[in-house]
Image (cartoon, rainbow, N blue to C red):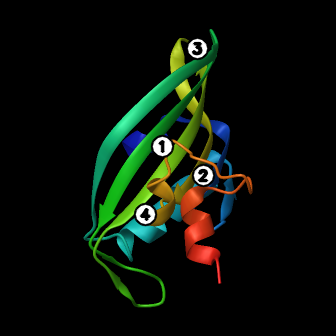
Amino acid sequence: MKAMHELDTEDVQWVNDSGNRWRGKAVVYKGHDAIHRTIFAKTGMTVEQTDIRAITPDVAVAVATLHFGPLTDPSGRSVKDLKTRASFTMVKRDDSWKIVHFHNTDVDPEAEKSDPVTWEETGFIDSWNKSHRK
């Protein structure tokens, strides 16, 4: 955790899939330290894919697809596999790339079937229409 958070800026903001918004390097480290000592203590993680896009010479966005599991969520439910997609906003400071903002969300397997997105005349993703029609 220490090595990972050396990549954070002092004013980093971290929004996780639960909606928690952690602000500042020390707070982000403290949050990750807590969950990695508890619910993620025995959880493996793999990176499926990473795409990086330069916005300016000093700003880039990285999107990574991550797999976690098995794990026990905060409610005590066992989860075999959790897939998330994370966005990292990176800035170049002192010749190093640093994380200034992070956000991730759980990947819905049904929604992912329409990725790349396909649309019907309704404007909704096809799989959403099929799963929400009465």
Badge 3 element: loop
Ranked by sequence position, the earlier of labels 1 and 4 is 1
Check disc 1: other Cα within 10 Å, few if <14, some if 14-19, many if 20+.
some
> 3 or 85: nearer the eye?
85
Task: Give the spatial CA distance, label 4 vs label 3.
Answer: 40 Å
Residue at the spot x=58%, y=14% of the render? 94
- Indicate the position of residue 127 as horizontal and vertical percent values: 54, 62
Placement of 100 over or under 44, stated as above or below: above
Ranked by sequence position, the earlier of labels 2 and 4 is 2
Badge 2 element: helix
Q: Is residue 81 left or right of residue 34?
A: left
Amino acid type, label 4: Pro
Which residue in the structure is indicated by mark 1? 5
Which residue in the structure is indicated by mark 3? 94
- Indicate the position of residue 113 as horizontal and vertical percent values: 44, 55
Mark 2 and mark 1 in contact? Answer it, CB < 8 Å.
no
Mark 2 and mark 3 in contact? Answer it, CB < 8 Å.
no
Residue 109 is tagged as 4
Check disc 3: other Cα within 10 Å, few if <14, some if 14-19, many if 20+.
few
Badge 1 element: helix
Kindly indicate the quadrant of the structure image that contains residue 42. Answer: bottom left
Mark 2 and mark 4 in contact? Answer it, CB < 8 Å.
no
Placement of 106 over or under 1, stated as above or below: below
Amino acid type, label 3: Asp
Residue 26 is tagged as 2
Amino acid type, label 2: Ala
Ranked by sequence position, the earlier of labels 4 and 3 is 3
